[in-house]
Image: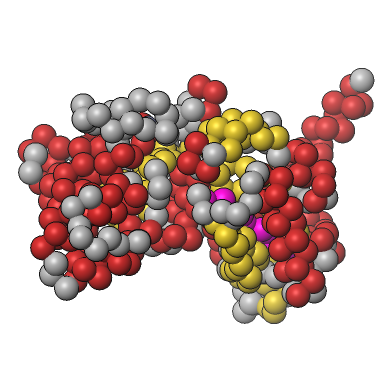
Amino acid sequence: MMLNIDNIHTKSIKQSNRSKILNLVYKNRDITKQEIAKVLNLSIPTVISNVNLLIEEGILEESGVAASTGGRKPVIVRLVKDSKYSFGVDISPDETRIILTNLYAEIKADVAFNHLGLKNINDIMGRVEVKINDILDKHKIPKESILGIGFSLPGIVNEELLYLENAPNIGIKDVNFSVFQKRLGIKIYIENDGNTAALAESVIGIAKSKSNLVYLQITEGIGAGIVINGHLYRGQNKKAGEIGHMRISDEGLICNCGRTGCWELYASEKALLRIYNDRADSKVQDLEGLFEKYFESDKLAKDSVNRYLDHLVIGIQNIILAFAPEYVIIGGKISCYEDVLLEPLTKRVLQESIFLDRYNTQIIFSRLKQNASILGSALLPLKELFK
Ligand SMILES: [Zn+2]
């Protein structure tokens, strides 16, 4: 019994030294074994044995020598960025997108398929499996080099049980992803899309140094990833962040959730298109179409964007009052129109209220744009490696 516990204990120390070393090399790109020992406060033999194991696994390599400070020249090590890969899968209302990334989250493959004709999640997952195998074949990557597949899902997700409780905007509920994990033979990770986007912005995006932020995933609906003191806040039963269903109006529009007046009915991408199309003679299909009109100084388009902002402002102000974040990050396709939206949004959310002005919250637009949530999903397996 004692022996077992000891074994586990020794193993977990080794594991954490390995992850600490990997993390440091990841951040520094090139670093000597001596520097690793110094920064992590580890003995040189500990560093050497861990680094040797990682070199054997092909994750690290020696990349030269640094100038000597007396004695032998210190050996520099670095990550072999194409030694391991990760898949990210984003299931949105009309399409499923799949990316392959390396250890530095660089996108190596990017495919999508329209799934409107497909009836259920089994059909979608069947297509995902085919696409993943195609990518592996095309890039000649063995399955063993894949750390995992991360899924970004617009709904309530239990990431520990691999269970999607409900995703009303894609009409899917009660899905157990461990079934697919068995079928694919690759470890699966799942997460809510607002959370994956927030993760991506914190790890590789605009918010690297920020520990309090709210990421707004503005698409068909509005989801949110809430980061408090550097940790994703999930709430009881993982239900936090359903900010799109916060009630901001007493008008009678009925939401997917069964209630009325939900924020996403007024401030989602879909809402902006509806605001315009309700009054337009020639309808627009998407944001590109709407903003094309906007840039032609179409009065209705300008007016619609303005009315849309009225609603967006109310929700963001509520979020600032509740969380006092350093950043509110606007994500989704709407973030491509930063040039048009940022200034009036900031002005109306913060500057028109002396009270809110004092919160020092900054409104920023996602740097990763529509890639935020899918990159975040590909980071889920990587996170496991560096944990
Ligand atoms: Zn609702």
Image location (x, y in percent) of residue 50: 78, 55
Image location (x, y in percent) of residue 178: 75, 38
Please tell me which residue lies in front, 169 or 228: 169
Question: Which residues, given as a range, are shown in magenta?
Answer: 83-92
Quadrant of residue 9 in the image? top right
User: Dividing the image into four equal quarters, which quarter contains ligand 1?
Assistant: top left
Please tell me which residue lies in front, 244 or 318: 244
Please tell me which residue lies in front, 133 or 342: 133
The residue depicted at 63 percent of the width and 51 percent of the height is 118
Q: How many labels does the image show?
A: 0
Quadrant of residue 121 in the image? top right
The residue depicted at 19 percent of the width and 71 percent of the height is 295
Please tell me which residue lies in front, 147 or 274: 274
From where the camera sits, is residue 274 visible?
yes
Image location (x, y in percent) of residue 143: 82, 61
From where the camera sits, is residue 158 visible?
no
Quadrant of residue 72 in the image? bottom right
Placement of 96 over or under 314, stated as above or below = below
Q: Is residue 164 magenta?
A: no
Name the quadrant of the N terminus. Answer: top right
The residue depicted at 17 percent of the width and 73 percent of the height is 296
Task: From the viewer's perspective, tell me whether residue 380 is left or right of residue 318.
Answer: right
Looking at the image, what colour scheme do you see? Answer: secondary structure
Type of secondary structure dominating the magenta stretch: strand
The residue depicted at 7 percent of the width and 38 percent of the height is 354
- List the single residue furthest toward the front: 281
Image location (x, y in percent) of residue 140: 80, 74
Placement of 13 over or under 335, stated as above or below = above
Name the quadrant of the C terminus. Answer: top right
